[in-house]
Image: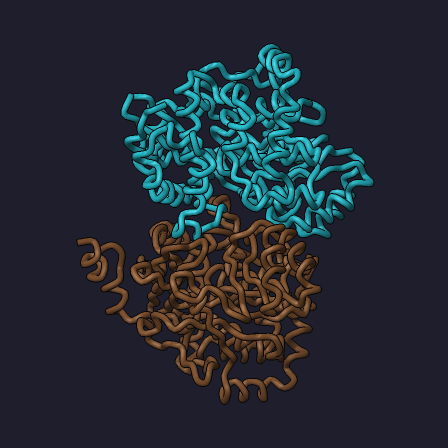
Chain colours: A cyan, B brown
Amino acid sequence: MLHTITSLTVRDVRFPTSLEQHGSDAMHTDPDYSVAYVVLDTDCGLKGFGLTFTVGKGTEIVVCAVQAVAALVVGKSLQEIVSDFRGFYRLLTSDGQLRWLGPEKGVIQLAVAAVLNAVWDLWARSEGKPLWKLLVDMDPKQLVSCIDFRYITDALTEEEAVEILVKAQEGKQQREDHMLEEGYPAYTTSCAWLGYSDQLLKQMIDANQRWDVAEAVSWVTSLAEFRPLWIEEPTSPDDILGHAAISKALAPLGIGVATGEQCHNRVMFKQFLQASALQFVQIDSCRLGSVNENLAVLLMAHKFQVPVCPHAGGVGLCELVQHLILFDYVCVSRSLSNRMCEYVDHLHEHFSSPVVIKDAHYMPPKDPGYSCEMLESSVQSHQYPDGDVWTRINK
Amino acid sequence: MLHTITSLTVRDVRFPTSLEQHGSDAMHTDPDYSVAYVVLDTDCGLKGFGLTFTVGKGTEIVVCAVQAVAALVVGKSLQEIVSDFRGFYRLLTSDGQLRWLGPEKGVIQLAVAAVLNAVWDLWARSEGKPLWKLLVDMDPKQLVSCIDFRYITDALTEEEAVEILVKAQEGKQQREDHMLEEGYPAYTTSCAWLGYSDQLLKQMIDANQRWDVAEAVSWVTSLAEFRPLWIEEPTSPDDILGHAAISKALAPLGIGVATGEQCHNRVMFKQFLQASALQFVQIDSCRLGSVNENLAVLLMAHKFQVPVCPHAGGVGLCELVQHLILFDYVCVSRSLSNRMCEYVDHLHEHFSSPVVIKDAHYMPPKDPGYSCEMLESSVQSHQYPDGDVWTRINK
């Protein structure tokens, strides 16, 4: 724990998925799944690995932002960080000059996510535990001390958060055993990707922010006979009141609204919950400010009794978010009702501890850390623009 | 109009304002007022100048983002752009890969603002008019064709926008003459900057996002005896419902809520208006997607009958936003009631057409363009990190 972070390196790693239209949707027609990939070095030799997900062009902008944030991290010891993780979170998100670029949104928030994912990975490795287990074993007060409650106390106070976690201590071991045995339910969306032949899935519709409010209501109403469970991202990810109007219109049809993969911070999720604007919370491990901010959202979702169904897919998103949803089940929601975690069978071979799926369930990771260490050979060959994969394509 | 854009250059220009605490506030304690400064070259020799405002560190990230957006601009002719400006706006904001970094928020939106500010400058110069006059003389249908109505049709349709503009044709000439003679009312906030000795101004309080919702209500209530006109940025700029709650609590005291300088797009402003979450709309010329998106906000504000009081100060913000508020008065709001435009007397000497203030009024600019061309000598000496000013400081 006394390890001092001596350097932070970040690389632009891209997979040429657009060549086969993997991951294409209505708004992102030609994504090259990519990451800004962070490695923290410490003076004791332990490393921390983190990433944030992007879809090609612009990854270099996130890399540039990570470099700006790095100055706030290098030289700190892990002990110093985790003994006041709330303060450290705020140091990164509220720097007097950098916060102008957000605050807590867009490129700068993606960069904070990449860096803090690496810090959490380092912490879990230093404890010799997978991240979900680090969280599960943590004292409620310490967990809550990682969360920045600024701007959310009208929805959830620190005391309420502790209370939720304390209450969930009961039966924790049984739920952990349950997960270790059976895993967390997964669902896949890749058959609905645009470049593929099937465009409509019976149980799920993903609109990818295509519609205005009235259009969304009209389109989904016309699809009601298929009895979809939810409509995903029906309109702008910023439109809380729009989602609320759509939710209200679709409720009589038994169709919910799911959103969150582009919801950029806890303040936005707070409002989605306050306004009954979603019926499924799709947290993302790389859009929000890492574990710290995801903890806030999991706790708020529980208070408002809305199930969390994480966004995954991409590259590395499954590896990361499985830890959060395992923690959610064991220590917060205590329920699997109406809950599942997205899964896409792509690009896992580039990770040193890839997800393990068994009978359509995520099996809890066992290796220490946050599962986002990539194979160095993969990183080197996919580095943009100089890796082998890209020099061959651009020849 | 057939000029083709042959190149786009962008530079990181910073003023060491933190040395004297100019511009410091509760959340931005040590700003170095800065810009990402864009110059468009064309094949006929005409140039376009644009910028977006930042507060120091991280300007290099915006520069990197501008470079990514540049690929979508270079090679286009001005004619091609302005004959489908809505389409061009969407090309920049909805690029299938870059939009993941926003969408329409944070660094990537600041970059789009810088680039489009330069395009509007180029257009105004090619017509030999200051930007406000280009807008004032434009046909309502053409004006509206510059706006992307995606995600705002539940608040304002294209037809309603045209109707507002057509209705305001009456008396337009008189209002233009009035502005040419007397100018637009300005107010200053610099005496409230933290580093200065006065911390409280009788008529205005700027909280700079300091409070949670309950704190804001309690603090402002305790200041009610000073009869402030508004409380500015009481909480997170993303918290629409929080601002609505604060507005509701303060209404009986006759205190309004003002916000917008960190409101990142038309979808957010739409909701602030729908939720009665603000009583003064503070548009910003560099946070929103340039003139295109500001037009949408001006028209929505008019429909909801909420006055627009632009955010300015910074560096270049006064130069830019004066054009928008002049247009608002002449062609949209037709009113000066409860309206004024922020003004700060800083850094104007670095511009080739600095603002002209007369008797606390902004006098309409006369030079062609959008007033954000900087003196080349200023740009060179303040370029970060290699300009004279910075090499001297960092010696």
- Report the residue at 42% width, 61% height from top: B194
Location of residue A335 in the rendering, given as x and y in whole percent from the top left corner: 69, 23
Instruction: Tell me the quarter of the picture where residue A364 sits.
Output: top right
In the displayed structure, B71 sits above or below B123; it is above
Front residue of B374 and A33? B374
In the displayed structure, B233 sits above or below B135; it is above
In the displayed structure, A112 sits above or below B248; it is above
Front residue of B373 and A378? B373
In the displayed structure, B291 sits above or below A194; it is below
The reply to whether residue B224 is in sight is yes
Instruction: Tell me the quarter of the picture where residue A363 sits.
Output: top right
Location of residue A160 in the rendering, given as x and y in whole percent from the top left corner: 64, 34
- Report the residue at 42% width, 37% height from top: A88
Q: How many marks?
A: 0
Q: Along the horizontal axis of the image, is A94 left or right of B135?
A: left
Name the outermost residue toward the left.
B395
- Report the residue at 32% width, 59% height from top: B18
> Considering the image in quadrants, where does the C terminus of chain A appear?
top left
Front residue of A197 and B250? B250
Location of residue A130 in the rendering, given as x and y in whole percent from the top left corner: 47, 19
Location of residue A188 in the rendering, given as x and y in whole percent from the top left corner: 61, 26
